[in-house]
Image: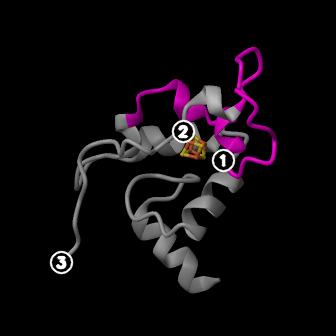
Amino acid sequence: MTEYRNTVPENWFVDPVKLGVPGVSNGGVGDDNPLAWQADALCSQTDPEAFFPEKGGSTRDAKRICSSCSVKSECLEFALENDERFGIWGGLSERERRRFRRRA
Ligand code: SF4
């Protein structure tokens, strides 16, 4: 049985300070951070709930945002590598990522 999460995971995005967002002191964390792409994530500036819709909820708004996101491919790659089961990542839903994986 598939488990559905209807809240945004606490670890969805790491603290922008740790990512080294320009103008924000990063405490010594550099560009070698594998999550550095998240500093440019468009969704971090929007309502994260849209990216983790309840079962049967619309993914349209999240996917529209992803389509303009400059780190879409990094995001999708991260989700595939980490087997992210919930939410919209890189413009794809969980089901679409499963299909994508099978085709690869
Ligand atoms: S592709 Fe979508 S989910 Fe990924 S970082 Fe960009 S806006 Fe967020």
Q: Is residue 69 magenta?
A: no
Q: In terms of depth relative to the viewer, which is nearer, 101 or 82?
A: 82
Q: Which residues are magenta?
A: 20-48
Specify whether 53 is left or right of 37.
Answer: left
Marked residue nearer the N-terminal end (2 or 1): 2
Task: Tell me the distance, in whole angstroms, between the alpha carbons under discs 3 and 2.
Answer: 29 Å
Specify whether 7 is left or right of 26.
Answer: left
Query: If the image is split into quadrants, where does the N terminus sit?
Result: bottom left
Q: Which mark is residue 1?
A: 3
Residue drawn at x 65%, y 63% as measured from the top left:
77
Label 2 sits on residue = 14
Residue drawn at x 51%, y 58% as measured from the top left:
92
Specify whether 78 is left or right of 93.
Answer: right
Marked residue nearer the N-terminal end (1 or 3): 3
Q: How is the image coloured?
A: one colour
Q: Is residue 78 above or below residue 1?
A: above
Q: Is residue 42 above or below residue 12?
A: above
Residue drawn at x 73%, y 40% as measured from the top left:
70
Specify whether 81 is left or right of 49.
Answer: right
